[in-house]
Amino acid sequence: MTGQKREDLSVLKPEFGRETSGESMDDQCREVRPADPCAIVIIGASGDLTSRKLIPALYRLFLNGYMPVSFAIVGCARKKLDNEAFRQLVKESLAKGVGDDLSKLDHFAGNLYYRTVEYDDKENFKELSCFLSDIDKKHGTAGNRLFYLAIPPFLYETVVHVMGEAGLSRESRTSGSWSRLVVEKPFGSDLKTAVKLNDVIKRCFSEQQVYRIDHYLAKETVQNILVFRFANSIFEPLWNRQHIEHVEISAAETLGVEHRAGYYEKSGILRDMFQNHMMQLLTLVAMEPPAHFRPEPVRDEKAKVIQSIRPFDLEHLEENIVIGQYLSGNIDGKKVPAYRDETGVDPLSLTPTFAMMKVFIDNWRWQDVPFYLSSGKRLAEKKTKIVIQFKDVPHSIFRDIIGGSISANCLTFFIQPIEKIALTFQAKKPGSTICPRSINMEFSYDSDSGETLEAYEKVLVDCMNGDQMLFLRQDLEELCWSFLTPLIEDCEKCVDKSSLLQFYGSGTRGPEGVEKLKT
Ligand code: BG6
């Protein structure tokens, strides 16, 4: 959580927001040290990810003083461009973006370079290596390189291999220069392909050099989960099977497949959202406190959660999972097509665009507490949230006044687009009679007034700083796949028989079977 001006704890009593000791928390927090000088090499610089996410994030980091004093950005792709043409493209795409201050655009563009490369050509990458040495001399980037793979995943192995052969993964003990590799999702398409990709990477880069991205982990509200759980003493004693009835983790989107049918048809919702984002949210809610807030202890605890997830009973999948695909419908007053009518989608496609699963974690803390994970495209609204549903009071002394049941307490992390934490509890309704009612206590982020970093900005800053906390370690990546691969394979088999897939209208809350899963 950042400065006091961002806190809005006003719903019950403004006093809740006051800092209690003389020294503010912000004063106690260590400053992020300025990143080392470095060259950021974007491989796949002519693609969508570069123009939509990476370049705007880098420019905003530059504007807000997060970039190292000495840096260069080197775009690489097959397209034939020179430095000037690349700079022009970047300037045009940034100028089209909304709201950024463009006064430093020329200064920023002066640090941009472009190299044409064939992705399987070792010579091209050797030339890149020489070029980067020249950049070091010109910009003082000290031999430090951050390689960002913004290419289609099928090219990862080829590119990593030629990078290794061209010596681009080498670090220097004497000068302390580093080389880091950022890998985007999807990381493989099942356990076997993920292990194979890791093997190729391991031949050239050590684990400390590899940054496997899950952009959900870089969201401000997601990072807050561990602070909320482990910097407060009042919630953690309740955070277990004695007090929690169930947990819901949901990521609903209104968007459809957009222009990504080629990828999505093969991936579907289970690979696209569950193997990564949903599993990571689950680990943050369920993990034990790590010994320290450092990358390795945190990632160790996450790995233990995934290892403890009860494997699905493949004979009775329908008891634990619902999958669906969107039909046409209305979203925000606009008619949208069915998934099968989207450009590039097979008219008989059986790819799931929605899934909900009931997951159990077999350990002392969580035994028999259901975790409902759901995500889908073309749903009624865009909303990601985590709901911790506490148990009912054991006995209601108010039963004669309000009947049998009192609403149980509920803690909700609203991840996006609204960013807040809300706790519901019972309080007396003002008046002459004793009448309990549910009220909300809220902490709300005001993303406009604080120094929030957008997910890709945070990812890039952490890579430049060598902080692997928000990135997936090899074992975590593979553990997620080993839990999901049997399910995905089985679903794909079932889907062939169309037995499991349920259709849902766009703009609804998903297939009807969803409610049944919760009973
Ligand atoms: C991506 C998925 O990882 O996450 C997309 O590939 C999805 O299909 C996106 O739309 C959702 O991210 P966010 O940050 O908009 O919730």
Image (tube, grey):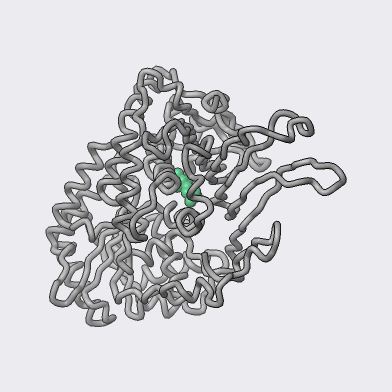
In screen coordinates, is 179 left or right of 467?
Answer: left
Residue situated in front as seen by the camera: 354 or 218:
218
User: Left or right: 453 with respect to 477?
Assistant: right
Quarter of image, res 209: bottom left
Residue located at (55% from left, 38% from top): 378
Residue 111 seen: yes
Image side of residue 188 versus residue 97, left or right: left
Q: Foreground: 389 or 243? A: 243
Residue, x 58% and y 70% (percent of image)?
Answer: 20
Quadrant of the snapshot with the C terminus: top right
Residue 514 figure quarter: top right
- Looking at the picture, tell me which residue is in the foreground, 344 or 356: 356
Q: Position of residue 255 (x, y in %)?
A: 54, 43
The residue at 34%/74% (across/down) is 35
Is residue 503 shown above or below 463? above
Q: Position of residue 189 (x, y in %)?
A: 30, 38
Q: Position of residue 135 (x, y in %)?
A: 25, 77
Q: Count every numbered label the image shows and give the total.
A: 0
In the rendered image, residue 423, in percent from the top left (x then y), is placed at 62, 49
Q: Nearer the viewer, residue 385 or 149?
A: 385
Question: Is residue 82 among the parts visible in the rendering?
Answer: no
Compared with residue 493, is residue 243 higher up or lower down, i.e. above or below? Answer: below
Figure check: 167 above or below 38:
above
* Residue located farthest toward the right when viewing the structure as drawn: 432
Q: Which residue is at 51% across, 71% downward?
A: 25
